[in-house]
Image (spheres, helix red, strand yellow):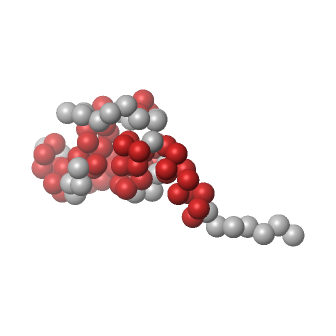
Amino acid sequence: MDTLPDFPRRRLLSPRELEVATFLVRGLSNKETARQMNLSARTVEDHRINIYRKLHVRNAVEVCYLIYGGDREVRSQRLQEAPRTHHV
């Protein structure tokens, strides 16, 4: 059951990915999520990978920021971590 608030790029996720994201933001592992959803842990892992790709994030923490804190925090963090390039 999807209980997530509205957030940027939400419409890009399938209903199943939104359900997995609900468990992800609660801190459940792939194995725990799989048990709750009656899926294999590998299937849950595939959904998580798709969630990260579609939301342009790298991990569960960034998913939480995006869902509960807005896109600005994730983007700001990414800019601070970006490697600096020197132009010659």
Residue depicted at 49% across the width and 51% down the height: 74
On the image, which quarter does residue 80 sit in?
bottom right
Residue depicted at 55% across the width and 57% down the height: 78
The correct choice, above or below, for 55 with respect to 61 in the image is above
Numbered label tally:
0
Left or right of residue 21: residue 12:
right
Left or right of residue 29: residue 35:
left
Closest to the observer, 46 or 56: 56
Left or right of residue 50: residue 71:
right
Q: Position of residue 53 (x, y in %)?
A: 46, 47
Residue extending furthest right? Answer: 88
Q: Position of residue 52 (x, y in %)?
A: 42, 49
Whether residue 16 can be seen here: no
Residue depicted at 24% across the width and 33% down the height: 2
Residue depicted at 53% across the width and 57% down the height: 77
The correct choice, above or below, for 56 with respect to 84 in the image is above
Closest to the observer, 72 or 28: 72
On the image, which quarter does residue 69 sit in?
top left
Closest to the observer, 5 or 24: 5
The correct choice, above or below, for 29 with respect to 17 in the image is below
Left or right of residue 57: residue 42:
left
Q: Position of residue 76 (x, y in %)?
A: 56, 53
Q: Position of residue 28 (x, y in %)?
A: 21, 54
